[in-house]
């Protein structure tokens, strides 16, 4: 599930520039959107992490991932700097929420002797998701149209968040078992 969520998040790097170009906006707009994202993450993440640390990890991860999916999908409605800025704000807030949680969940699920392998597999998933966003995401956008891409991002991201949340009890039991061992 994390792989699909990472794919959706990676569309911000692969397909957002195409959308901005298709709106006949300057490439500098993409740079500005990257700056908006960076400022929001740097400014908000320390505060959000401290507050969200008290909450159950998996529901927070799923809420943040759903927020990313909604924000990425809003890109399909944007056609101006204001519209792109609004979409970036939404997915950036999701990014602030999920920062570090997925890696922590993966580490907590791993047996102590296999944590490095689990983290390696998780990092590999990031690479695959980014590659898929660059290839499959761009192919969907150019071959089938941007609407297909943005709707796919929304549906896949929200469904994966819901499916992950459905496993919360199982994951929580396994994490507590692994941490006790």
Image (spheres, rainbow, N blue to C red):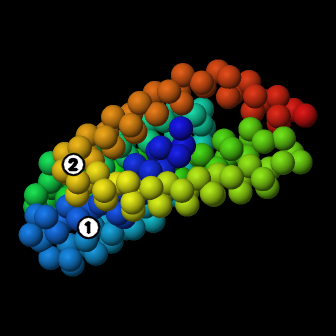
Residue at numbered disc 2: 144
Residue under pointer 1: 17
Give 55 or 16, whichever is nearer the viewer: 16
Residue closer to the observer: 28 or 24:
24
- Across and down, in percent, residue 61 comes to 52, 39
Label 2 vs label 1: CA separation?
A: 17 Å
Left/right of residue 69 with respect to residue 120 in the rendered view: left
Q: Is residue 23 above or below residue 102?
A: below
Q: Quadrant of the C terminus?
A: top right
The local secondary structure at tag 2 comes to: helix
Q: Where residue 15 appears, x then y in whole percent?
A: 29, 60
Whole-percent x, y for residue 7 in the image? 44, 51
Mark closer to the chain start, 2 or 1: 1
Decide if residue 170 is in sight here.
yes
Q: Residue at x 53, y 38 (%)?
A: 1
Residue 40 in view, yes or no: no
The residue shown at (75%, 33%) is 175
Q: Along the horizontal axis of the image, is 114 left or right of 21?
A: right
Task: Give residue 163's mark.
Answer: none
Q: Nearer the viewer, residue 92 or 132?
A: 132
Q: How packed is label 2: few (under 14 Cα within 10 Å), some, or many (20 or more)? A: few
- Farthest front residue? 143
Q: Residue at x 57, y 34 (%)?
A: 58
* Nearer the camera: disc 2 or disc 1: 2
Q: Secondary structure at mark 1?
A: helix
């Amino acid at each position: 599930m994390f792989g699909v969520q990472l794919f959706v998040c990676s569309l911000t790097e692969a397909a957002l520039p195409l959308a901005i170009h298709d709106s006949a906006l300057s490439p500098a707009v993409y740079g500005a959107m990257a700056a908006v994202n960076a400022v929001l993450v740097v400014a908000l993440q320390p505060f959000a992490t401290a507050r969200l640390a008290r909450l159950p990890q998996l529901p927070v991860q799923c809420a943040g991932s759903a927020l990313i999916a909604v924000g990425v999908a809003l890109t399909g409605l944007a056609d101006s700097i204001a519209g792109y800025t609004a979409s970036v704000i939404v997915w950036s807030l999701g990014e602030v929420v999920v920062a570090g949680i997925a890696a922590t969940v993966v580490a907590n699920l791993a047996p102590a002797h296999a944590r490095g392998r689990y983290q390696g597999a998780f990092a590999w998933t990031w690479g695959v998701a980014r590659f898929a966003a660059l290839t499959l995401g761009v192919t969907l956008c150019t071959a089938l149209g941007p609407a297909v891409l943005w709707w796919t991002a929304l549906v896949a991201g929200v469904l994966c968040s819901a499916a992950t949340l459905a496993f919360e009890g199982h994951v929580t039991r396994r994490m507590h078992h692994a941490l006790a061992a």
